Image: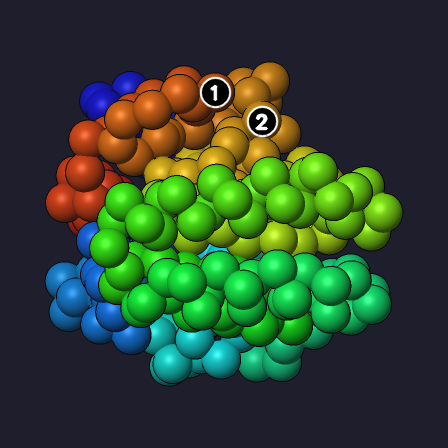
Amino acid sequence: MKDLIEKYRKSRNRLLLLDYDGTLVQFSSIPINALPSEELLDTLIRLENNRYTKVVIISGRSSDDMDKLFGKLSITLIAEHGAMIKSFNMWHSVVAESDVWKKSVIAVLEEMTRDCSGSYIENKRFSLNWDYRSSNPESGSLKSREIISKLEDGGLLQLHDLKIHIGSKNVEILPRGIGKGHTVLELISHNINDFIISIGDEATDEEMFEVLKDNPDAYTVKVGDGHTCAKYRLEEVTEVVSLLKNLSLCD
Ligand SMILES: [Mg+2]
């Protein structure tokens, strides 16, 4: 931690790549309740006001959600796992939009939603997300496995070149060409950063850790347990916020 802060202090072109749910805030059974704390907002504002630091929040959430949470801040927002980026106050898509695959996948998800009370489908611009955090955990987890095997065995993934992200209480289906890894590669392609920190807690964040793993200026940090290719680990959200707070006190 000392080394990291020292390196941050000495660098002049810093990039902070931060996941949101499970990283900057705790999971909530109702996503709309997972709001950033005052402490977090103050910290992000202080970081962004530092002329050497660029703050990017890179999340799987929709652009509308991101605007509701952080629209008032001047930080860079990336939504839908990297498919959309907000710069100069305008959202634009990083990849071409295609809906042709959604109809057949929705049919599978709707069947599971009927059998699993509390679960719901979120139809985002670039992905379909089946969420069961408000359902009975056992039946939700069972149904999520059923979704995965139906999509795999039915050949829908191969046919439309899709991938599945398995979250802690959700299953998300999206085109293979979309991911935090692709978008982070694009962000760092000019190679101007002398300090990068990337923090996240889920499978989608592993793509970002993967593209940074050979970068000598990058610190990759996994939040919580589980397999990771990140170099460092923090146990919980409060530790992430306190690390960011420490960084925000540097010049
Ligand atoms: Mg997360």
Quadrant of residue 115 in the image? bottom left
From the viewer's perspective, is residue 10 above or below residue 237? above
Q: What SS does tag 1 mark? A: loop
The answer to whether residue 206 is visible is: yes
Nearer to me, 220 or 155: 155
Nearer to me, 9 or 248: 248
Cα separation between marks 1 and 2: 7 Å
Quadrant of residue 219 in the image? top left
Residue name at image x 24 percent, y 55 percent: 136
Determine which residue is flagged by label 1. 229
* Whole-percent x, y for residue 182 in the image: 69, 43
Quadrant of residue 36 in the image? bottom left
Contact between marks 1 and 2 (CB within 8 A): the answer is yes
Residue name at image x 61 percent, y 60 percent: 108
- The kind of residue on which mark 1 rests is Cys
Determine which residue is flagged by label 2. 210
Judge: label 1 CB < 8 Å from ligand 1: no
**Number of residues whose C-alpha sits closer than 10 Å to that of mark 1, classed few (under 14), some (14–19) or many (20 or more):** some
- The kind of residue on which mark 2 rests is Glu
